[in-house]
Structure formats: structure tokens, C-alpha cells
Image: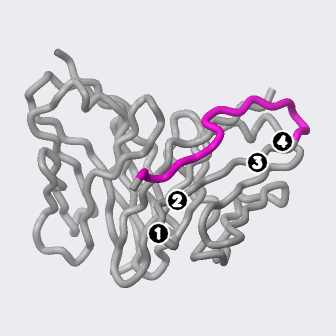
Amino acid sequence: AQKITQTQPGMFVQEKEAVTLDCTYDTSDQSYGLFWYKQPSSGEMIFLIYQGSYDEQNATEGRYSLNFQKARKSANLVISASQLGDSAMYFCAMRALYNNNDMRFGAGTRLTVKP
Amino acid sequence: DTGVSQDPRHKITKRGQNVTFRCDPISEHNRLYWYRQTLGQGPEFLTYFQNEAQLEKSRLLSDRFSAERPKGSFSTLEIQRTEQGDSAMYLCASSESGKGFYEQYFGPGTRLTVT
């Protein structure tokens, strides 16, 4: 069974600083994908970044990067140069390649960016 | 492309009533997913369609829940004889299909309150 763990219920960061949101996972699948989504107070889930289990390089998308450590089964999200608009819930999720209907989400981390 | 849309955005109903939600996916996406999200939790998978075929249902989807995607475009999720425990955000997502991973794009959700 797949499981996603986000141990930080809430995080604070000063505007313009970088922040790391933790995510660990557990799976017996060899091929899987890891995803991060942002959910503002409006409720919509916004896709941020994706990392495949066989990707050798860490994924980056603008100010978002994914610190993927396969042996430790961690996929932490790094947000650089935080902006006030980054304040939101952040969810880590994973999906197996051969069971790609069922995306499992963590409980989320609420990020607050302070001015 | 206008993204995934859901209607209504909010629904308040009395216990025992039936409710129906609609989801319009991104037009070229042939996969459509329904999730349920309760307060303080990440989304939980409910069911999945590839075109008009419902290929997987979670054990969370009791017999009071039914989903359809009659023409492979929009989908409806009906809850019969609503219970207070059904109060949640119902999220719809769509994605492309094929080899590899495709991120799921989410709609704004329908927030259901059962009184």
C-alpha cells in the first residue's frame, strides 16, 4: 500500500526567504511519480511540480524545486524567494505507474508567508 | 482552454435529500477523477473514468454514491439519501492518458454541507 506523510502541519517563512516542505512516502512499487499541489483558500488544487522515480535529476519549475532522495523515500518541496501569494496549503501526492488511477495525498502543510 | 469546471460551487442540503454535482473536464482530457476532501485532510480518491467507462471505484464510494460520464465528456456525481458525514469538498480532476505520468488538473470543487 502507498502512504504519504507530511509531518509539518504548519510552516512560517519570511517573505523573500526559501522554505522546505517535507514529504516522505512508502511504496512497494518500483515505478511511481511524486507530485506537489498548492491549494489556496479558494479551494482549487494547483499542480506545481512532478518527479518520476527513475528521474536522475531533481525536478525544477521556476521557484519550485523538488529535493528527491530515493533511498530515504523523501520528496521535499523547496520554494525559493517566498512571496505573500505562496501562503496556502501544500499537498504531496504519489501515484504508481501501473496503478495510475489512484493518487494518494498527504495531509498537507499550511504555509504562511510573513511580510 | 478554460480548465476544469464544477457546478455548483456550494451546496447546502438537508439530511436524506439527494444531490448531484457536475464536472466539465479539460476538453482534450479523456481521464476524469472524483475525489473527496474533508477538513484538514488531503483529497481521497473516489472513482475514475477513461472516456465513458468507469474503471475503478474506491471502497469509500458507498452504494449511495453513483457517478456517470455518459458521453465521455462531462461527469456527474450523485449522492442519494445524504448523511452528515457526506459533508466535504468534492473535487473533480482530469488528465491526458498514455505512457508515463500525466498530472491531474483539478477543478474548484463543490463544497457540500449536509444539515
N-term mark: 2 or 4: 2
Residue A115 image-quadrant placement: top left
* Viewer-nearest residue: A43 or A28: A43
Query: What is the spatial separation of the Cα atoms under label 3 and label 2, in whole angstroms?
Result: 16 Å
Image location (x, y in percent) of residue B22: 66, 51
* Element on which disc 3 rests: strand
Give the answer, above or below, for where A78 lies relative to B74: above
Left or right placement of residue B3 versus residue B82 in this view = left
Label 1, residues with CA under 10 Å away: few <14, some 14-19, many ≥20: some
Residue underneath mark 3? B20
Residue in the picture at 36% in, 51% down: A92
Q: Which residues are magenta?
A: B2-17
Which of the two labelled residues, at mark 1 and mark 3, occupies the earlier sequence position? 3
Tell me, yes or no, whether dots 4 and 1 are on the same chain: yes
Q: CA distance from mark 4 to mark 1?
A: 30 Å
Residue B106 in the image: state x and y as whole percent.
46, 52
Which residue is disc 2 drawn over?
B25
**Mark 3 / mark 4, whichever is N-terminal:** 3
**Where does residue A82 sit, x and y in percent of width and height?**
15, 31
Q: Which residue is mark 4?
A: B82
* B76 displayed left or right of A14: right
Distance from label 1 to label 2 (Cα)? Answer: 7 Å
The residue under label 1 is B29
Query: Residue B73's image quarter?
Result: bottom right
Q: Chain of mark 2?
A: B
Q: Amino acid at mark 1?
A: His
Frontmost residue, B36 versus B30: B30
